[in-house]
Amino acid sequence: MIVKEVLARSIITKSGLPDSDYVINPYVGCQHGCIYCYARFMKRFTNHKEKWGEFIDVKMNSPDLIPKTSSYKGRTVCISSVTDPYQAIEKKYGLMRGILEKLVPLQPKLCILTKSDLITRDIDLIKRMKSCKAGLSISVNDDRIRKEVEPFAPSIEKRTEALKELKKAGIRTFVFISPMFPELTDWKTIVRKTEKYADEMWFENLNVRGYNWNDIRKWLKSKHPELLKKYEEVYFTKNGYWNGIEKEIRQYCRERGIKHSVYFHHSR
C-alpha cells in the first residue's frame, strides 16, 4: 500500500448523489480492495498510476478545511462518496474525529456510510449531531463470498455488531445492501438479520461499467463460472431483470413495514 500525506484545497464539495447536497472524502483511494468499486474512475482526476486499491492519499488538513461558520446548517452532507472514511488507515490518522468535531457546531444533516465497524469509535461525536444517519454497507450474506469481492473489508458479523451499537446509542441507522450481485446477494436474509437494528433499508444493484467489468468477469470465471453467462445476459442484453427485483424489494419491505429506498441502475 502506497501511502502519501497530502494537503487538500477543499474538503466539502457539491454532490451529484441523490439526497445529498455536499460530500466529504478525507482520503483518496481505499484499502478495501473491492473488485466492483465504481470510485476507481477517480484515477482520471488524481493522476495515480498505481492499481486501484494499492494507494491512499491522506488529506492531512481535512479537519482544518471545515469552516467555523457557514450555511451548511440544514443542508445534507454525506461522508463519504468515493472512499471509506473508516478504512483501516483511519485508526492511525483519526481524520474523521477531527472532521466530526468541526461539524458539530455547524449541525448539517449528516449521513455517514462505511463498511467498517471502526465507526463505533466516534459514537460520542455522532450522538451530538441533531440530524444524522449512520449506515453500514453489506453486499452479500455469505462471508466467504465477501472475502472474494471485498477482500480487505471488515466481516459481515463486525458490521452487524457495529450497527447494533449505533442503534443502541440512539443514532438513526440504515443498512445499504449494495452492490447486489445477481444470484449471490441474498438480500432477504440480510434484511431479516439486520432489520431490528436499522431504521431504513437502502438497495443498490451492481453497476457494471467499462472500468470494473473486466475485474468482475475475471472473478466470475475464477470463482463462479456457472454465473458468467447469466451476468452477460443481465448486463449486456435488453431484459427486465432489475425491474423485477425492484418490484419484489418494494413489496417485501411494504409487507414488513420497512422504510426503504431503491437506488437502482437500470441500464449499463
Image (cartoon, rainbow, N blue to C red):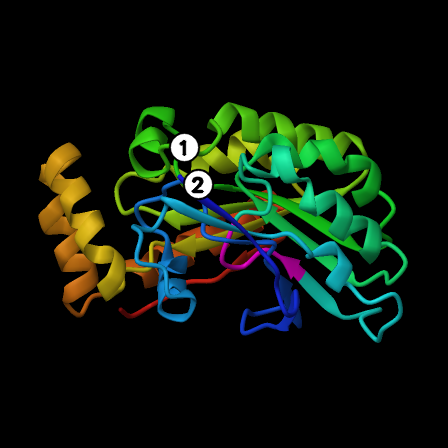
Going by the image, does 46 lie left or right of 93?
left
Q: Which residue is mark 2?
A: 31
Question: What secondary structure characterizes most of the magenta part?
Answer: loop
Q: Which residues are magenta?
A: 78-83
Locate the N terminus and report the quarter of the image it occupies: top left
Kindly identify which numbered label has been placed on residue 144. none
Give 41 or 174, whichever is nearer the viewer: 41
Kindly identify which numbered label has been placed on residue 152. 1
Tell me the crowding category of disc 1: few under 14, some 14 to 19, or many 20 or more residues within 10 angstroms, Cα based: some
Q: Position of residue 249 (x, y in %)?
A: 45, 51
- Contact (Cβ within 8 Å) of mark 2 with mark 1: yes
Going by the image, does 35 lie left or right of 110?
left
What number of labels is visible? 2
Location of residue 121 with respect to 12 vertically, above or below: above
Helix, strand or loop at mark 1:
loop
Q: Nearer the viewer, mark 2 or mark 1?
A: 2
Q: Position of residue 251 (x, y in %)?
A: 48, 53
**Circle 1: residue type:** Phe
Give 235 or 258, whichever is nearer the viewer: 235
- Residue at 62% x, 65% y is 23
